[in-house]
Image (spheres, grey):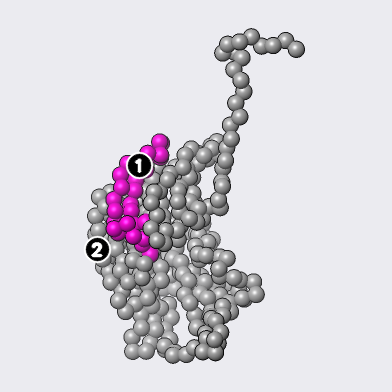
């Protein structure tokens, strides 16, 4: 065969290796314009940024040093309103990244390098809500300055989960309070900028039982509808039996609930109550499904979930 002449026209072909997803994505979000997709795996060591038009991985953002309990469960990220920046929180540190280059723009240590318990950005990444690992303290931060706006203490309450509304104006928290032997499961809506209570909704109320028998371990998620007019609490509470512990046995997981309840924010009136039935221990292993409660969303027209 005739050989090609030397020079630029005879450039050798190149093999381009696109590694793609090397670990399952635990969290993924779209940029506001739908042009980019950011994903994080369970170990929360990095964030991958993808260009949707070409399905091409643009770059990998290395989040840096880890703390003692740094995972995707207590790490988070969000695009700003025009998608030019990506904000992340990992190991108690707030960082801003340029989505065009992947370059770190700034870093602010919010928690002395220690992990938070819960972390949640508003949709426009303007506000950040965090809790301590024990969930006894909730703080709301201004993301642009890294300044703490206020703190709320939960010394006698069991804070389950929190969420910020799409417009960033409302903070919803689900917590239990134990007073006089009565356990109250409450959804509280707060003004996100000041922490002032707007609406308190009672989910359930029951007497505290002192027993080693069956009990419930709450697993919750809060979701606002896209228009911000409704708020939902998703319950995947695990039912556990500790009756065998006194004889040397272990706590046994029996099943978990699968419920969704929705309230109108302005009136506090319950609008939807859905019970999809419990999932038995024979088909559900809690150790294999961490954070299953996060698998919930409203459709954009507010008609489906």
Q: Nearer the viewer, residue 280 or 109?
A: 109
Mark 1, Cα crowd under 10 Å, few <14 / some 14-19 / many 20+, is: some
Task: Give the percent coordinates (x, y) of residue 209.
Answer: 44, 89
Residue 101 is drawn in which quadrant?
top left
For numbered disc 1, what is the local secondary structure? strand
- Region rendered in magenta: 91-117
Asked if residue 12 is positioned above or below residue 218 in the image, the reply reads above
For discs 2 and 1, the disc positioned in front in the rendered view = 1
Q: Say if the magenta span includes residue 198.
A: no
Q: Residue at x 41, y 68 (%)?
A: 161
Task: Give the percent coordinates (x, y) of residue 45.
Answer: 45, 51
Mark 2, Cα crowd under 10 Å, few <14 / some 14-19 / many 20+, is: some
Q: Tell whether 132 sits left or right of 9.
A: left
Q: Nearer the viewer, residue 270 or 155?
A: 155
Q: Tell whether 9 sits left or right of 188.
A: right
Asked if residue 241 is positioned above or below residue 50 in the image, the reply reads below
Q: Residue at x 52, y 76 (%)?
A: 238
For numbered disc 2, what is the local secondary structure? strand
Asked if residue 92 is positioned above or below residue 3 in the image, the reply reads below
Label annotation for residue 104: 1
Task: Give the percent coordinates (x, y) of residue 251.
Answer: 53, 81
Asked if residue 40 is positioned above or below residue 209 in the image, the reply reads above
Q: Tag 1 or tag 2, which sits nearer the N-term?
A: 1
Is residue 301 visible in the rendered image? The answer is no
Label annotation for residue 280: none
- Residue bearing the label numbered 2: 150
Q: Residue at x 57, y 65 (%)?
A: 288
Task: Give the percent coordinates (x, y) of residue 160.
Answer: 41, 71
């Amino acid at each position: 065969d005739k050989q090609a002449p030397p020079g630029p026209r005879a450039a050798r072909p190149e093999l381009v290796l696109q590694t793609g997803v090397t670990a399952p994505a635990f969290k993924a979000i779209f940029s506001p314009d739908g042009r980019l997709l950011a994903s994080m795996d369970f170990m929360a060591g990095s964030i991958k940024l993808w260009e949707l038009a070409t399905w091409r991985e643009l770059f990998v953002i290395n989040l840096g040093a880890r703390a003692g309990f740094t995972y995707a469960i207590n790490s988070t990220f969000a695009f700003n309103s025009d998608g030019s920046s990506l904000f992340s929180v990992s190991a108690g540190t707030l960082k801003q990244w340029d989505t065009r280059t992947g370059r770190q723009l700034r870093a602010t240590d919010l928690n002395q390098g220690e992990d938070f318990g819960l972390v949640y950005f508003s949709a426009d990444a303007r506000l950040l809500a965090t809790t301590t690992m024990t969930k006894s303290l909730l703080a709301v931060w201004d993301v642009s300055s890294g300044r703490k706006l206020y703190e709320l203490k939960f010394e006698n309450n069991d804070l389950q989960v929190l969420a910020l509304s799409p417009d960033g104006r409302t903070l919803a928290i689900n917590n239990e309070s134990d007073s006089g032997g009565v356990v109250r499961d409450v959804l509280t809506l707060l003004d996100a900028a000041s922490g002032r209570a707007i609406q308190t909704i009672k989910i359930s109320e029951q007497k505290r039982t002192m027993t080693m028998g069956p009990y419930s371990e709450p697993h919750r998620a809060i979701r606002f509808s896209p228009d911000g007019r409704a708020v939902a609490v998703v319950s995947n509470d695990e039912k556990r039996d500790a009756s065998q512990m006194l004889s040397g046995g272990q706590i046994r997981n029996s099943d978990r609930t699968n419920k969704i309840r929705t309230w109108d924010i302005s009136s506090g009136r319950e609008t939807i109550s859905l019970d999809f039935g419990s999932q038995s221990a024979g088909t559900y292993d809690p150790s294999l499904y961490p954070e299953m409660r996060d698998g919930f969303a409203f459709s954009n027209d507010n008609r489906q979930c």
